[in-house]
Image (spheres, helix red, strand yellow):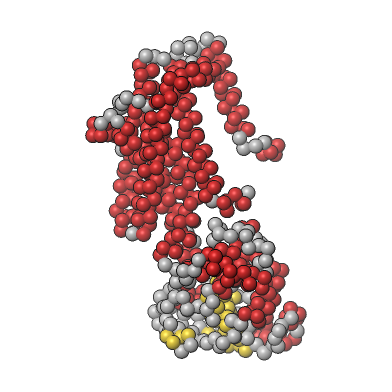
Amino acid sequence: MPIIEDVSFYLDQNEFVTLIGPSGCGKSTIFNMIAGIVPVEEGKVFIDGRDCTGEVGQVSYMYQKDLLLPWKKVIDNTILPLIIKGESVREARKKVIPYLKLFGLEGFEYKYPFQLSGGMRQRAALLRTYMFSKDIVLLDEPFGGLDAITRSKMQSWLLEVIEKVKASVLFVTHDIEEAIYLSDRIYVLTERPARIKEEVAIHLPRPREREIVTTTQFNRIKRHILLNLS
Amino acid sequence: MRKWENIGDKTIPLLFIFIILVFWQLIVDGGIIARYILPSPYDVVVVCIKIIPDIKEHIWTTLQEALIGLVVAIALSVILAVLMDNFTLLKKAIQPLLVVSQTIPVMVLAPLFAMWFGFDMLPKIMVVILVCFFPIVVNLLEGLNSLDQDLLNLMKSMKASRWHIFSLAKFPASLGSFFSGLKIAATYSIIGAVIGEWMGGKSGLGVYMTRVRQSFALDKVFASILIIIVLSLLLFEIIELIQYLAMPWRRAIK
């Protein structure tokens, strides 16, 4: 049985698009295929009209786990992509310093990852993802492991950061509220084999305040997706 | 039992050892076992202090053999483990051989080594390498294998080269297991050298032990054992110190 069937979607520049679906429906596999980590049996990945199927290094990718290297200090974790590109530690550190504040990591740069809270670690992981500096950012349930309060804070923070750094984000979650709050468009996926059940455009104004999740308009969308998912 | 947890890690084992020693001392002092059959702990310590100036040469020889053997074993193990980790075919071919090498009794090999390589330090060093090699390779291999698959994928998605994956992720991830293996190897290295020396030679703690055993100087045999224990523990502590320095992120965990 195929994991994914007839899935076709697009991401515009500076757009925030979410794939939502039941756990284990193959969302992460789609991401791995876009990132070029798992082989694609059928179908193609296009970036800027160019066929990039199976190519690694075309997108910035962040996992649910922070995957910070425990043996490197926060600052040296965030420059990992630059080191891999062959830059020296000194150069790379110089480049990352202006972003530490924006990502809320000021004062933590010389701590080890395990000295940080879950939320802080995800910030560091996101900065590392950002330092790979590809226009397209894949975020695979980045807040899945956080408690509800931290999670909600991190969502608002993510919106703020993206507003400033201008990135095109492809996001995966199974949290409907998170999806609506963050996205411009949502693709609702079915269970395995994953197919696209529906595309939902979210016409909520930006910048979004946290309170938006309590509005009627928000809840109408939520209700719609909820019914569609079950 | 909560109050026991507050006592330092070292207090309980030290206390236990002390009780055993007192018990042993009393048995010998009370004449239950004759002194020439089992010297008392006190006698052993006194003899030990007395003979150390005379056997400095022997200690030095053994220490040298152990250290050279250990260093060579570390170098060989690291090279072999890295190769095995990179080439699956090699790993499959060598892994059973590694295990087999550990089933050959060292007691039998040591005299063979003496026959082949003479009575100098070389055959003893070979024994040390043989006993130290295995724990390091096995632990290092396991450590190299322990890297999170997702982290590996993440690095691949960043177009990391094999060298970068190794140097930035795999190797540091394996350091903990590597040092575990190293600690076992370090404690084995002294005994390895001593076993090698039993088969003959001019100098070394093993040579000295054979001589005093043949002249039934049991207190000196026990004194040699004490020296071997101290040397082994010393090596163990040195490795711990190196680990402490080499893995600064472990310190902050505590």
From where the camera sits, is residue A3 visible?
no
The relative height of residue B128 versus residue A168 in the rendered view (above or below) is: above
In the displayed structure, does residue A155 sit left or right of residue B198?
A: right
In the displayed structure, does residue A108 sit left or right of residue B198?
A: right
User: In this view of the protein, which residue sits in the foreground, B64 or B111?
Assistant: B64
The relative height of residue A159 versus residue B35 in the rendered view (above or below) is: below
Residue at 58%, 71% in the rendered image: A95
Q: Determine the residue located farthest toward the left in the rendered image.
A: B116
In this rendering, the count of numbered labels is 0
User: In this view of the protein, which residue sits in the foreground, B78 or B32?
Assistant: B78
- Residue A87 is situated, as x and y percent measured from the top left of the image, at 49, 69
- Residue B104 is situated, as x and y percent measured from the top left of the image, at 31, 38
In the displayed structure, does residue B44 sit left or right of residue A230?
A: left
Residue at 52%, 78% in the rendered image: A134
- Residue B79 is situated, as x and y percent measured from the top left of the image, at 36, 52
Residue at 47%, 41% in the rendered image: B183
Residue at 43%, 40% in the rendered image: B185
User: In this view of the protein, which residue sits in the foreground, B5 or B195?
Assistant: B195
In the displayed structure, does residue B3 sit left or right of residue A201?
A: right
From where the camera sits, is residue A213 visible?
yes
Q: Quadrant of the N terminus of chain B?
A: top right
User: In this view of the protein, which residue sits in the foreground, A182 or A105?
Assistant: A105
Q: Which quarter of the figure has residue B109?
A: top left
The relative height of residue B159 versus residue B148 in the rendered view (above or below) is: below
- Residue A28 is situated, as x and y percent measured from the top left of the image, at 51, 74
